[in-house]
């Protein structure tokens, strides 16, 4: 950025205006905190509506929408045994809030993934391929945390709107 500065300088009792040009280079830096901004629809429509569901309905929905097996869902995503997963699915045991929250978020993620890719099978293929956005890791390995699910959700939103670069 160039700035002009006018100074009055006395030279031999006469006033003259001299132009001094001061050149400054500035660096523009965005200084926002790192945060994940989720659309309100992610929370309002999907999480709040599903909190009241019992575990049988919730796990049945997760199994249907994801197309994943009990073994994959229990061991890789919820990090529980298949036997415990079946107890939750059959409503025999109260589901812990962490697992219920993860199930609701996973359901929400797959709803968007099925819209973007057309089916859960194609979405699962995308999840199992290395992706530069995830440091050349498979997105599926991030499905076991809320933060990971939110990162995948945001990437799906970018894909949906064609902003992948």
Image (tube, helix red, strand yellow):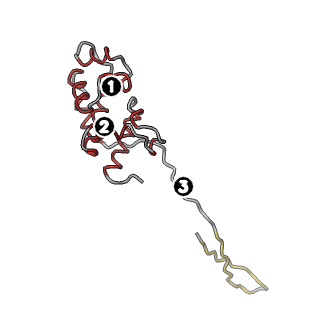
Q: Residues within 10 Å of mark 1 (few under 14, many from 20)?
A: many
**Circle 3 residues within 10 Å: few <14, some 14–19, many ≥20:** few
Instruction: Looking at the picture, tell me which residue is in the foreground, 19 or 51.
Output: 51
Does the residue at mark 2 contact the one at mark 1 (Cβ under 8 Å)? Answer: no
Classify mark 3: helix, strand or loop: loop
Q: Indicate the position of residue 57 as horizontal and vertical percent values.
A: 20, 24
**Mark 2 to mark 3: distance in Å?**
33 Å
Q: Quadrant of the C terminus?
A: bottom left
Q: Is residue 1 left or right of residue 12?
A: left
Badge 2 marks a residue whose secondary structure is helix
Residue depicted at 37% across the width and 40% down the height: 152
Instruction: Name the residue located 71 percent from the left edge and 85 percent from the top edge.
Output: 15
Between residues 52 and 139, which one lies in front from this camera angle?
139
Q: Residue 36's quadrant in the figure?
A: top left
Residue bearing the label numbered 2: 109
Q: Sequence-wise, which precedes: disc 2 or disc 1?
A: 1
Name which of mark 1 and mark 3 comes first in the sequence: 3
Q: Nearer the viewer, mark 2 or mark 3?
A: 2
Judged left or right of residue 4, residue 11 is right
Proximity of marks 1 and 3: CB atoms separated by less than 8 Å? no
Q: Dot 1: what SS?
A: helix
Percent x, y of residue 138: 42, 37
Q: What residue did someone put label 1 on?
A: 73
Residue under the image location 29 percent in, 40 percent down = 122
At x 74%, y 87%, the residue is 14
122 in relation to 163, above or below:
above
- Nearer mark to the viewer, of 2 and 1: 1
Q: Which mark is residue 29?
A: 3
Label 2: few (<14), some or many (≥20) within 10 Å? many
Numbered label attached to residue 18? none
Q: Nearer the viewer, residue 27 or 62?
A: 62
Q: Quadrant of the N terminus?
A: bottom right
């Amino acid at each position: 950025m160039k700035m002009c500065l006018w100074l009055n300088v006395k030279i031999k009792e006469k006033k003259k205006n001299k132009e001094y040009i001061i050149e400054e280079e500035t660096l523009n830096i965005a200084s926002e905190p790192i945060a994940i901004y989720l659309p309100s629809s992610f929370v309002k429509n999907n999480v709040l509506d599903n909190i009241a569901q019992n575990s049988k309905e919730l796990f049945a929905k997760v199994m249907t929408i994801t197309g994943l097996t009990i073994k994959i869902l229990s061991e890789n995503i919820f990090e529980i045994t298949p036997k415990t997963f079946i107890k939750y699915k059959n409503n025999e045991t109260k589901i812990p809030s962490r697992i219920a929250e993860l199930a609701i978020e996973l359901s929400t993620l797959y709803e968007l993934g099925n819209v973007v890719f057309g089916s859960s099978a194609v979405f699962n293929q995308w999840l199992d391929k290395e992706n530069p956005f995830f440091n050349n890791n498979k997105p599926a390995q991030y499905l076991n945390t809320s933060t990971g699910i939110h990162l995948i959700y945001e990437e799906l939103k970018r894909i949906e709107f064609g902003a992948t670069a």
